[in-house]
Image (cartoon, rainbow, N blue to C red):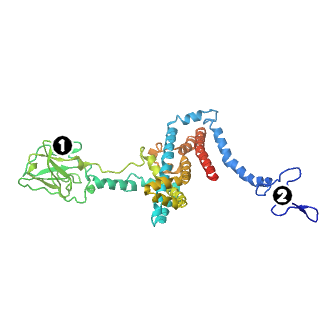
Amino acid sequence: MTTADAGGTAKVPPGQPSPAPAGGGRPRRSVTGTRKTVAALFLLPALVLLGALVLYPIGYSVFRSFFDKSGDFTAFGNYKTMFTDDAIRTAIKNNAIWVVFAPSVATALGLIFAVLTERVRWGTAFKLIIFMPMAISMLAAGIIFRLVYESDPDRGVANAVAVSVHDTFKESSAFPQAHPGPESPLKSGGGGSFITKQPVRAGTPVMLPLLGVAPDQMPDSAAKAVEAKAEDGTVTGTTWQDFTRGKGAGKRGGVDASELGYSGIRIEAVKDGKVVASTTAAGDGTFALPKEADGAQLKFPASNFREPYNGIEWLGPALVTPSIIGSYVWMWAGFAMVLIAAGLASVPRELLEAARVDGANEWQVFRRVTVPLLAPVLAVVLVTLIINVLKIFDLVFVISPGSSKDDANVLAIQLYNSAFTDNDYGVSSAIAVLLFLLVIPVMIFNIRRLRRESRR
């Protein structure tokens, strides 16, 4: 009901809806009470910016993709080039590898970290450490991992670890370049080994000179070489670096005062193709073999001359893409962990306890209760990372060396090269359109998921 004021104007009591205007029209106000024209005026600058910075570039990229490098109309020629050019096909293949592995590995690690850190007292500190790489820019992370993957074990952390582990189980030789001289009593034994030309006899010292190892590369245990003494019933000898610096210095085949023994080198006595005795040389190069070595040939096995293990070629053509993906996971696993941990905090603990009471072990609780309840959060993380890796640029550009850049190529790098190196804006626009089309299905999935979540 309405009442009239002193001027005869109808007043609406509080809480009652306003009457419709004469003629049955609706009030020209928005839901918030703001006039629609005013709202449109306030939105106009944002719409102009949206059109200028988003819609126009998209439309112009689609338009430019139908013209070739010189500006002539080529229809779908650039798109045909995109799928026939080897460099672009490599970029598409690498992008597929990135989309499949990088988001899934980062999300899986984030899930593991989030679940495990709930059960330790220092979980917050651990989360902080794992999340810290997110504070580093892609450029800085690329420089860091370019050094981590350095091929020289003395500089690259990855190869320093690889060499340490390798040498723990299979020690490298200290004499990789050693070999007999032209007048040596040794000959090639096949497979990188050396063997004496004639059998040796007990009581007669054997001289086994070698060349090829610089004095500063000799083992620390190497001492000045001495000639072995004859011993009855024992094969004795000396093996040493038969080289003295200086023209005409020293005598070939004899031990000089400045020459070092091959400390630790292995010597085997071989009869009829079988090893009957073996030993290693002392620091001064001397060695002794039992009476079984009498009449045998002495052999330096190939293991003495094995090249030192220098690690893995992380940034070579075969491993450059997995290595760069590893650096990406190092950065973004913390991001995934934080989001998943936030979702995990909202999981009802009663459900977890009920599963344990029903007899489920921890793995079953994790697989059948925790993961299904975290499915919406996992989807958010996965979609975010997929969109992120589709346009990956910085890490690939910085980490991959010149020799492997073609093997590590991705679409964003190829777009840059086509536009600014080859000056082919038609192909670069076609690549931009392809990236846009690849993002659309992911965005549609994300929008539908958000709508389903809002209806719950």
Residue found at the far bottom of this picture: 121
Circles 1 and 2, Cβ within 8 Å, touching? The answer is: no
Quarter of the figure with residue 156: bottom left
Q: Which residue is mark 1?
A: 187
Mark 2 residue type: Ser
Q: Secondary structure at mark 2?
A: loop
Mark-to-mark CA distance, 1 and 2? 111 Å
Residue 153 visible in the picture: no
- Residue 186, quarter of the rendered image: top left
Residue type (three-letter) at the residue carrying disc 1: Lys
Outermost residue to the left: 232
Task: Give the secondary structure at mark 1.
Answer: strand
The one of 77 and 340 positioned closer to us in this rendering: 340
- Locate the N terminus and report the quarter of the image it occupies: bottom right
The one of 132 and 101 positioned closer to us in this rendering: 101
Q: Position of residue 112 (x, y in %)?
A: 46, 56
Q: Residues within 10 Å of mark 1 (few under 14, many from 20)?
A: some
Q: Earlier in the sequence, mark 1 or mark 2?
A: 2
Mark 1 or 2: in front is 2
Give me the residue at 20% from left, 49% from top. Answer: 210
Disc 2: which residue: 18
